[in-house]
Amino acid sequence: MATNEIVECIRPLLARFSEDEEVVRRLVATDGTFDALCHRYRRVIDLLKAYEAEADQGAEIERLKRRQAGLEEELLTRIEGYQPQ
């Protein structure tokens, strides 16, 4: 994955957990599961933006916000539990 692609993938995550940028970057580079979670998180954020632009998508927005919160919790658990080798 190119550097620009990595940065775009994790940009929303870094905005949310900016104090953990170094750990996030390391995990994306070394942990495929974490990288996949970042991609899912980015997709949810993108979908939320798209649905929020439409007036009658309240139920879908709420579902996506719950999904976002779940992903944030899982990502933060991995960030906080990261042990450098």
Image (cartoon, grey):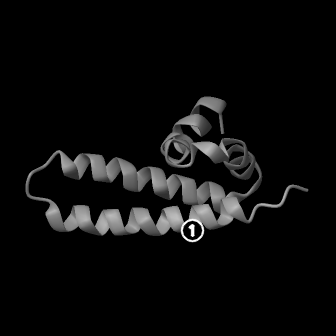
* Identity of the residue furthest to the right in this view: 85
Q: Nearer the viewer, residue 10 or 2?
A: 10
Work out which quarter of the rendered image holds the N terminus and state it: top right
- Residue at 58% across, 35% down: 7
- The residue at the far left in this view is 56
* Residue 74 in which image quadrant: bottom right
The location of residue 30, given as percent across then percent down, is 77, 52
Residue type, numbered disc 1: Glu
Q: Which residue is mark 1?
A: 74
Picture quadrant where residue 57 is located: bottom left
Q: Position of residue 12 (x, y in %)?
A: 48, 44
Residue shown at 50% from the left, 61% from the top: 72
Residue 4 in the image: x percent, y percent?
59, 30
The residue at 46%/69% (across/down) is 70
Under circle 1, the secondary element is helix
Name of the residue lying farthest toward the front: 19
Count of labels in the image: 1
Q: Is residue 50 left or right of residue 56?
A: right
Question: Left or right: 35 with respect to 47?
Answer: right
Q: Is residue 71 left or right of residue 58?
A: right
Residue at 33% of width from left, 63% of height from top? 65
Quarter of the image where the C terminus is located? bottom right
- Is residue 29 shown above or below 65? above
Percent coordinates x, y for residue 82 in the rendering:
76, 61
